[in-house]
Image (spheres, grey):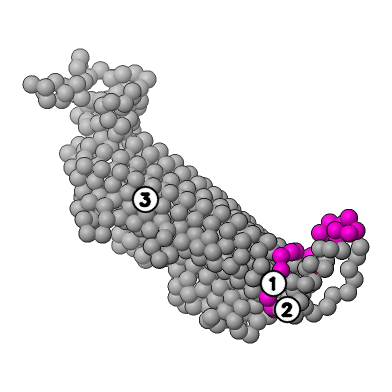
Amino acid sequence: MKISKLVKISSISLGLMALAFSAIAFKSGEAASFAPITSCGTISSSGNYELANNLSSASGTCLTITAPNVNLNCLNFSITGPAAYPSTAIYSNQANTSVSNCTINDFWKGIHFENVSGGSVIKNDVRSDVTQAFGIHLSGGTGNTLQDNTAITRPSYGGAAINLEGSSNNTLLNNYAESDKWIGITLWDLGGIGANNNVLTGNTGIGGADGIIVWRSHNNRLVSNTGTGTGNPGRGIYLVASNSNTLDSNICSATASATYIGVAGCDLIWSSNNYLANNQIQSNGGASLSIYGDGTNGASSGNIMADNTLSGPNIQAYIYGNAAGGNTFVRNHFTETAGIYVRDESSGNIWDTGEGSRVRQGNYWPNVLSGSVEVIDSKPGNGWGNCGTGFPYAQATSQGKFFGPGADNAPATTNIGNCGGQNKLETIKSQKKK
């Protein structure tokens, strides 16, 4: 059955129209039809809806969804707002809300889900210059999917392109989020409830401050994302008071050239038991990787950094504060720089896998691999050093590239040789036993 005539739908009649179209489709055996929307209003009944034309709103909220199980497809028609606060293009507080293919401009909030569960936001384009604008905003709720969206906010101050606030167990996949004055993607707490257990994969977050920030939120998994902070301060991926998160195979980049320590590719503050692996961590400014903890606001300990590549002209790993010990660094690739590889101002950090490991493994230091610092592998085929004049790799042996109390007792090396019958590490052990 073909529906050839479109009528203007009031806020009261949207729900009735959806039911009528569903009934017609059911009786005829055809695929479910979509009720056309031609003006702003309220969707008060479950069903399928689609825009029939562009919409505009002079104030307030354009489309309000007050029924569960609503599927709204904008068919790439636009919804244009007043370029003022407060205003929202699409608002829902109902379960299983789906919003797709919408082009949204000039609202304070483009798409706002409040306590929505099981919803989806897919293939939307949301842009705004309103101060403190949020492109896509999830407050509360759980189990939603955000996929293939573009959200760009260019306010004079504040806001975030994609913001999850106290919203958990969501999936963010292949979204592009840019905010030139503030933050690309935020996972933020709401009234002390974190945005927890979310999975972010293949997203791009670019911010004038931070690319991606995890704030007082835990057990999130970030895989193959790109986070870029362009300002001073500015961080690629920033964890604040956030624990037990996994960052795997991301690109964390800070592009500002300022030497201020707040310019960091990846920055952990008051955050513990996080796992960072296989990331590209780079900064044009202060530090590639920065970790800070203190006894007043919170420690940063128990974090594991493994198999990352760190690059930058100043400090590639900076650990500071009186409670930033107990972190482990293994198999990380530091890169050649006029600056330094490590400045560790805390104590108790670990730079290799330890004596109990089957093969003791440390990190990759450029001046060891080049032969400038002599570290020898006396166990051919092992690839990890255990003697030499530059062993262990520490402040006294690193030629000014490693500062702090720690030491790498198994730095990677290509120098295969004989340690003279007994390697240096074994000598150290025997001396301790005496």
* Left or right of residue 79: residue 327: left
Work out which residue is located at the far bottom of the displayed protein and give it.
Answer: 58
Residue 41 is situated, as x and y percent measured from the top left of the image, at 69, 78
Q: Which residue does the numbered mark 2 point to in the structure image?
A: 12
In magenta, the rendered stretch is: 25-48
Residue 207 placement (x, y as % from top left): 47, 64
Identify the disc placed on residue 243.
Answer: 3
Q: Are marks 3 and 1 in contact (CB under 8 Å)?
A: no
Q: Name which residue type carries label 3.
A: Asn
Q: Which residue is mark 1?
A: 44
Instruction: Give yes or no for contact between labels 1 and 2 (Cβ–Cβ under 8 Å).
Output: yes
- Name the kind of residue labelled 1 in the image: Ser
Q: Quadrant of the N terminus?
A: bottom right
Distance from disc 3 to disc 1, alpha carbons, whole Å, reads 40 Å
The answer to whether residue 236 of the structure is visible from this angle is: no
> Does the magenta-highlighted stretch encompass residue 32?
yes
Q: Residues within 10 Å of mark 3 (few under 14, many from 20)?
A: many
